[in-house]
Image (cartoon, grey):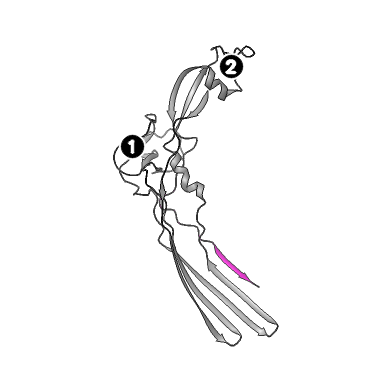
Amino acid sequence: MCRTGITQAYAKFRSTSQYYYFDDSWKVRPNLNISLGLRYENTPPWYDASQKFVNAEVPYFETTPNVQDLSHHPTFVRIGNGDFYEGVALRFGPGIQVARDGRMGVRSVDTDNNDFAPRLGIAWTPSPNWTIRAGAGVFYAQDSGTPKFDPARNLAGYRLENTNTDFPRPELGRPLPQPWRRDHDCELSGRARSAAAPPDSLHDRIPAERTAQPYQEHGF
């Protein structure tokens, strides 16, 4: 059996991020300064102008096998409205549920609008030769690029093909296919049947996922 890609992943990602902050320093005493600040970050998820972004709606996290109720099964949801397979050269098997009805919004992932990051800094000089500084704050760690881009691969798919090991090869040294050369066998051997399948793994992003917010303190 061999596996070959059907189409290339394709997307036109667009996004505009906004960041605002203010801070102020207060000289409480001649040898004590306090700095206060607040930063606001708004980093929306990517919008795919090509309308090929596909996320996975997982209504239930089942722990039992062979769930019969289809409403508990995951659904591939393509952004936009209309035909899920519009402009796509593949078709998934009947066991894979698909939808394109806007149920997950225009970006398929919710925007986190609550990213407020307070900051505090203290500088104390007990003597002309010593200064003690300390600070604390909230800092938001955005996802790396790959988790954001991976769902664009969901609409690419691949093909599984069972090779016919009895089919002769057009090579004098190796007239019969060797099972450990699967990629080569796909090119030269007979093919018994093929079927469109989803990608290697399900690429999804939790729609209501909050941006990570580590708390940091330091002093010296």
Q: Nearer the viewer, residue 210 or 166?
A: 166
Residue 84 point in image, percent of width and height:
33, 37
Which quarter of the figure has residue 193? Answer: top left
Magenta segment, principal secondary structure? loop
**Image-based side of 70 in relation to 125, left or right:** left
Residue at the (40%, 61%) spot, across then down? 113
Q: Does residue 193 appear anywhere in the picture?
A: yes
Q: Is residue 189 above or below residue 81?
A: above
Q: Does residue 57 appear anywhere in the picture?
A: no
Residue 41 point in image, percent of width and height:
45, 63
Residue lying furthest right? 129
Residue 47 point in image, percent of width and height:
39, 49
Among the two numbered marks 2 and 1 on one chain, the one whose residue lies closer to the N terminus: 1
Q: Secondary structure at mark 1?
A: loop
Q: Residue 84 has which mark? A: 1
Q: CA distance from mark 2 to mark 1?
A: 39 Å
Q: Residue flagged by tag 1: what amino acid is it? A: Phe
Which quarter of the figure has residue 74? Answer: top left
Task: Report the label total.
Answer: 2
Residue 204 point in image, percent of width and height:
45, 44
Location of mark 2 (residue): 177
Residue lying furthest left? 82
Q: Nearer the viewer, residue 13 or 69?
A: 13
State yes or no: residue 65 in magenta: no
Q: Residue flagged by tag 2: what amino acid is it? A: Pro
Q: Residues within 10 Å of mark 1 (few under 14, many from 20)?
A: many
Residue at the (54%, 61%) spot, across then down? 214
Q: Which residues are magenta?
A: 205-220
Q: Nearer the viewer, residue 212 or 51?
A: 51
Q: Residue 55 has which mark? A: none
Q: Is residue 182 above or below residue 120?
A: above
Which quarter of the figure has residue 20? Answer: bottom left
